[in-house]
Amino acid sequence: MKSSDSDFIKDFFENCLAIDLNEGAKLRLKALFNKLRKDNRVITIQDFGAGSKKLGNERKISTILKTSSSKGKYGKLLYQMVKHYQFKNCLEFGTSLGVGTNYLALGNSYANITTIEACESTRNIALENFASFENVKSEHATFDDFLSSKASKENGAYDFVFIDGHHDGDALINYLEKLKPFTNKETVYILDDIRWSDSMFKAWNKIVKSGEFEVIDLFRVGVLKGEN
Ligand SMILES: C[S@@+](CC[C@H](N)C(=O)[O-])C[C@H]1O[C@@H](n2cnc3c(N)ncnc32)[C@H](O)[C@@H]1O
């Protein structure tokens, strides 16, 4: 941490990252991971982003868990952030199996969590994993279609946005721009896979240089907060 770091950045490292999962969350997540690890069902996925070409479109649920879900310290980061900042309106771009959404919902049962997924067969599996959450709303849409729909305007401004799909640099910049009417200067973003490709890393550097945000680089993910 540099001496010039802002209150937001100091607080993030000193307090937010110090939060541990509570026992209830640990048990729920353990059960979810056990279930998904054993799930040998194969689904046909439709790729709406810059997905891996190597994996093919027929995928086992257990493989999707391995390759695409938030786990370990990255899953915990979602939980820590939603708990620490007590966000009220959270938006997740890219639901996949709903693992990241579970971390968010377990971190704060009072937060409204809206999660967007365009691939229907993937979303159907996520719906199985949301059964007990009253605060999760799953939308079947592309990110672009969601942003131009009525549903996107129902919650007021989002104070937390997790962009975890369509890992293409130009698309990322575009989504941040299109999200402006739905966010404010207090909104905190997590951008996943900022070093996944040259185009993602270029976009990340452009965002950093823009001076529009306070920026925390956690190597795989970037955290942004609108500048005061
Ligand atoms: C990396 S996974 C999301 C993982 C999840 N956020 C988690 O934390 O466990 C990305 C998901 O985004 C979806 N996706 C990619 N591009 C999309 C787009 N343009 N519109 C809607 N969904 C998209 C993919 O179908 C995929 O399921």
Image (cartoon, grey):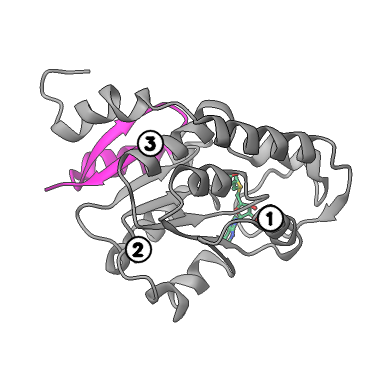
Q: Is residue 213 magenta?
A: yes
Residue of label 2: 179
Q: Is residue 121 magenta?
A: no
- What range is drawn magenta here? 201-228
Q: Could you tell me if the residues under marks 3 and 2 are in contact, i.e. CB atoms within 8 Å?
A: no
Check disc 1 and report its element: helix, strand or loop.
Answer: helix
Q: Where residue 166 sits in the image (x, y, percent)?
A: 55, 53
Residue at image point 32% right, 47% down? 86
Q: Could you tell me if the residues under marks 1 and 2 are in contact, i.e. CB atoms within 8 Å?
A: no
Residue of label 1: 126
Mark 1 or mark 2: name the one nearer the start of the chain.
Answer: 1
Residue type for callout 1: Ala
Above or below residue 25? Residue 4 is above
Mark 3 or mark 1: name the one nearer the start of the chain.
Answer: 1
Note whether residue 54 is visible. Answer: no
Is the CB of the residue bearing disc 3 within 8 angstroms of ligand 1?
no
Residue type for callout 3: Gly
Residue of label 3: 222
Residue at image point 25% right, 45% down? 225
* Marks 3/1: CA–CA distance: 25 Å
Q: Where residue 46 sits in the image (x, y, percent)?
A: 73, 60
Left/right placement of residue 107 relative to residue 87 reads: right
* Marks 3/2: CA–CA distance: 17 Å
Marks 3 and 1: which is nearer the front?
1
Above or below residue 149? Residue 35 is above
